[in-house]
Amino acid sequence: MAEQQHTTMVWKGGMAFEGTTTTGHKLIVDASREGGGQDSGPKPIELVLSALAGCTAMDVLSILQKKREPMKGLEVYVEGERASEHPMVYKHATIVYRVYGEVSKASVERAIELSNTKYCGVHAMLGKTAHIDTRYEILPARNLEAIPAA
């Protein structure tokens, strides 16, 4: 059976809304000052890139942990370019993965591939309107605690 989810947005004045998700987490979205808001939270369109980064980051982390790769850190940077005409959807995005530690190149490539082709629903949806490029860097471990295995 398909998982049902919901979000409620309640107007808080100006252009600000407080959202509550299925799991009860809250967030504020707002417009920029130029857009009539007070810039008290991210614009809704910004959350699309955040959702993509979070979705693929969780996938890659999980896959690398299952492969018992000695990862010491993970950062995912996503940059997007929007259309100039309304509805101003994202037309292009780039995902950059920064993996810290002595991690196998083949494992990183496979984890990214699985996330982007099988597991990340945000990537699948955004890919309907945007061309998405990916690249990665494997960097020496920083002074970070090891990420615990799942």
Image (tube, rainbow, N blue to C red):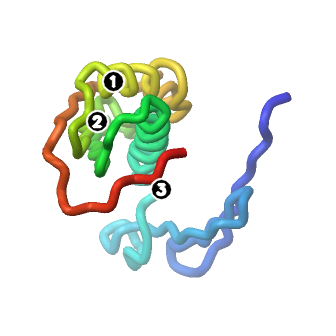
Looking at the rendered structure, which numbered label has been put on residue 44? 3
Sequence-earlier tag: 1 or 2: 2
Mark 2 vs mark 3: give the one in front.
2
Do the residues under discs 3 and 1 have CB atoms within 8 angstroms? no
In the displayed structure, 111 sits above or below 61; it is above
Mark 3 vs mark 1: give the one in front.
1
- Amino acid residing under circle 2: Ile
Looking at the rendered structure, which numbered label has been put on residue 143? none
Is residue 138 visible to us here? yes
Q: Would you identify the image quadrant in which residue 112 lies?
A: top left
- The span from disc 1 to disc 2 (Cα, nearest Å) is 17 Å
Q: Whole-percent x and y of residue 107?
A: 33, 24
Sequence-earlier tag: 3 or 1: 3
In the displayed structure, 48 sits above or below 126; it is below
The secondary structure type at the circle numbered 1 is: helix
Do the residues under discs 2 and 3 have CB atoms within 8 angstroms? no
Residue drawn at x 72%, y 60% is 23
Q: Which residue is mark 2?
A: 95
Looking at the rendered structure, which numbered label has been put on residue 107? 1
Q: Would you identify the image quadrant in which residue 115 lies?
A: top left
The secondary structure type at the circle numbered 2 is: strand
Q: Which one is in front, 91 or 149? A: 149
Q: Whole-percent x and y of residue 16?
A: 52, 73
Mark 1 vs mark 2: give the one in front.
1
- Amino acid residing under circle 1: Ser
